[in-house]
Image (tube, rainbow, N blue to C red):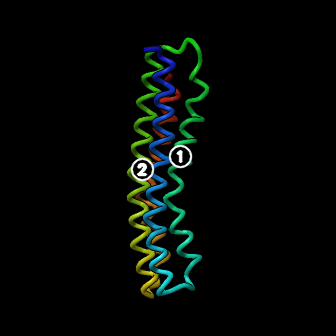
Amino acid sequence: MEPIFLAYLGVALVLVLSGVGSSYGVTIAGNTVVGAMKKNPGAFGNYLVLSAMAGTQGLYGFVGYFIVKPFIVEGITMFQATAIFCACLALGLLCLFSAIRQGQVCANGIAAIGNGNNVFSQTLILSVFPELYAILGVAAIFIVSTVI
């Protein structure tokens, strides 16, 4: 296998996994919005913010791509390609799972707001915790990029 192929495979994985995770996360939250709107339609702004939270992990996948892009060139070594592949795979998996879990946290907050509870701020704070791990993944891919 050519090293450049391995690096591009890593890029494909980070983009796909982060995108799929964000798609699932925003869908989980969005589905809950539909139910919550029946009980409390006046809180749509809060629902919208919480629904969008899980979409950021897809953006982190693109950030990861732009971090490693300068290193994917003809003549890339197998070591460099493997480092890119592994870093992209790690970031992709972190984004996948953190987006899904973040969507679930937001969905619970949306349901509570729909039931008349004033928990928007608390839900927003709690939804940041799963996202933190995706941010750490971006930091890790940046650190890996400094040694390749």
In this view, 61 is above or below 25:
above
Examine the rendered structure and indicate whether residue 36 appears above or below residue 131.
below
Q: Quadrant of the N terminus?
A: top left
Q: Which residue is mark 2?
A: 133
Residue at which label 1 appears: 60
**Left or right of 89: which side holds 48?**
right
Q: Quadrant of residue 119?
A: bottom left
Q: 75 and 123: which one is in front?
A: 75
Identify the residue at horizontal 47%, vertical 87% (top origin): 39
Measured in 3D between alpha carbons, the distance from the residue under mark 2 to the one under mark 1, in whole angstroms, is: 11 Å
Q: Secondary structure at mark 1?
A: helix
Residue type highlighted by circle 1 = Tyr
Q: Which mark is residue 29?
A: none
**Of pointers 2 and 1, the one earlier in the residue sequence:** 1
Residue type highlighted by circle 2: Tyr
Displayed quadrant of residue 13: top left
Give the foreground label among 2 and 1: 1
Q: Position of residue 33 (x, y in %)?
A: 48, 74
Q: Residue at x 55, y 11 (%)?
A: 75
Q: From the viewer's side, name the closer residue of 56 and 44.
A: 44
| Location of residue 8 in the rendering, given as x and y in whole percent from the top left corner | 51, 26
